[in-house]
Image (spheres, helix red, strand yellow):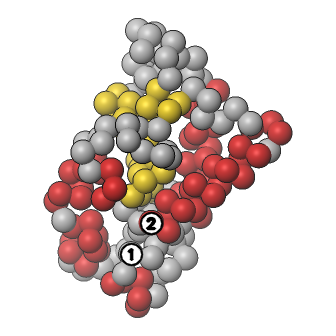
Amino acid sequence: LKEESHLTNTPALVWISQPDVQKTKGNRAGEHTPIWSNESECKAIIDILKDLDKNSNPTKKIKLAILSPYSNQVKLISKHIEIEKKKNQFKTLLNNYIPPDDNDGYCLTVDSFQGGEADIVLISLVRNNGKSTIKSALGFLSDQRRINVLLSRAKYKLIIVGSY
């Protein structure tokens, strides 16, 4: 990376707060099975990608990973990336980036990215709820190994999209 790149001249950790608008809120099955998705966070991820694309001019391609704990969110983001790439004004989306090693795409679940690393990692947390205990609020993300993978895969920049 160039010394004056947008990765070294901006904060290494960024949190983008989104309102709690998950579609599966109150869905009992959603409390036990990771079927979650969040359209608002998906849109925010696309906006971030557009902004990164506008502000990057790397000397070499940058490894980019987009992670979510939930496969439905990974599918939703992947679908929206393809939609954006097909739009005339946005065909260059992700031209300055490559997927992380040994991965076919940019969007991955946290479990599938174990052992991986990327220069930039975007995370869509998807879920927010007011459960009384940490375990019930975080669901399967209360597993420390998952949180470790989720938060430790970025080499230069970690961008978290979620509600706080």
Left or right relative to 18: residue 53: right
In-front residue for pair 67/163 = 67
Left or right relative to 133: residue 103: right
Q: Vertically, is 110 above or below 23?
A: above
Left or right relative to 153: residue 105: right
Q: Vertically, is 124 above or below 73?
A: above
Left or right relative to 82: residue 67: left
Q: What is the x, y in percent for residue 115?
A: 24, 45
Q: Which mark is residue 71?
A: 2
Residue drawn at point x = 39 percent, y = 58 percent: 109
In-front residue for pair 40/104 = 104
Please tell me whether mark 2 sits on a helix, a strand or a loop.
helix
Circles 2 and 1: CB distance less than 8 Å? yes
Residue 39: name its quadrant: bottom right
Q: Vertically, is 136 above or below 125?
A: below
Residue drawn at point x = 39 percent, y = 18 percent: 8
Residue 43: name its quadrant: bottom right
Residue hosting label 1: 34
